[in-house]
């Protein structure tokens, strides 16, 4: 079943289902056919699977990933929309404590969709990282950043190293993102686990802006 889904072969998927191969069967990684359709991006196969009574929209694999989380990470917007419309839970976390919003990867369209369904925008994973921090470090995007802030993302939250979102922006030399955070009210005096303040980490041009803001 999973091989047919990965090949986006709906006819074969239907044939296998008719031969008593359950759509809920899990592979060696505990992934179902729905996981693989979310990964491959085949909307036709995914919609058919969702129409079947045995399909579990919130099934988790052995790492805790749901089909929604996979679709978000892969950037398949139509798949994300369809899963959400069929009851996919945007608040289920994986084994690392990450919810789908952690995997926005700087995609405005996907972040906007998930924010409608996410109960706690400040959910921190096992590393203390929040979706806001993901919009600063790994996948910097000012639009996603502003969207998260509008939905209550906390500027003062710290990861396990004591870094706030502003610390991370400065450590990654994301000057434009850092300015966005400063303008939004990020604490300029906050120190991280290495006892470094935001001013300590800022480049000369940004230090002057920070100093002027503090005077």
Image (cartoon, rainbow, N blue to C red):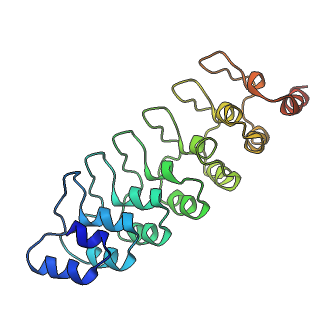
Q: Could you say which quadrant of the image residue 106 lies in?
A: bottom right
Indicate left or right for 15 with 102 as reference: left
Residue with the most extreme bottom position: 11
The quadrant of the rendering that contains the N terminus is bottom left
| Quadrant housing residue 4 | bottom left
Image: 135 above or below 165 = below
Residue 65 position (above or below residue 208)? below
Q: Residue at left 63%, top 31%?
A: 164
Query: Residue furthest toward the left?
Result: 20
Q: Quick one: which residue is furthest to the top in this view?
A: 195
Q: Position of residue 59 (x, y in %)?
A: 26, 57
Which quadrant: the C terminus?
top right
Horizontal placement of 71 versus 21: left or right?
right
- Rendered residue at 21%/80% (across/down): 12
Which percent across, then down, holds residue 10? 27, 81
| Residue 161 locus on image (x, y percent) | 55, 24
Rendered residue at 53%/57% (across/down): 115
């Amino acid at each position: 079943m999973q091989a047919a889904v990965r090949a986006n072969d709906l006819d074969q998927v239907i044939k296998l289902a008719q031969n008593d191969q359950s759509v809920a069967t899990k592979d060696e990684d505990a992934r179902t056919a729905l996981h693989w359709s979310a990964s491959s991006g085949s909307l036709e196969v995914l919609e058919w699977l969702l129409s079947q009574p045995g399909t579990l929209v919130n099934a988790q694999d052995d790492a805790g990933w749901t089909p929604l989380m996979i679709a978000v990470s892969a950037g398949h917007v139509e798949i994300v929309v369809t899963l959400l419309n069929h009851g996919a839970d945007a608040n289920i976390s994986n084994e690392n404590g990450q919810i789908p919003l952690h995997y926005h990867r700087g995609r405005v369209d996907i972040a906007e969709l998930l924010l409608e369904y996410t109960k706690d925008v400040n959910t921190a994973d096992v590393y203390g990282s929040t979706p806001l921090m993901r919009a600063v470090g790994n996948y910097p995007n000012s639009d996603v950043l502003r969207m998260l802030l509008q939905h209550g993302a906390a500027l003062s939250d710290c990861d396990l190293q004591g870094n706030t979102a502003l610390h991370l922006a400065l450590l990654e030399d994301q000057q434009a993102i850092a300015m966005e955070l400063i303008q939004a009210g990020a604490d300029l005096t906050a120190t991280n686990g290495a006892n470094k303040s935001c001013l300590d980490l800022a480049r000369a041009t940004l230090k002057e802006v920070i100093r002027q803001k503090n005077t």
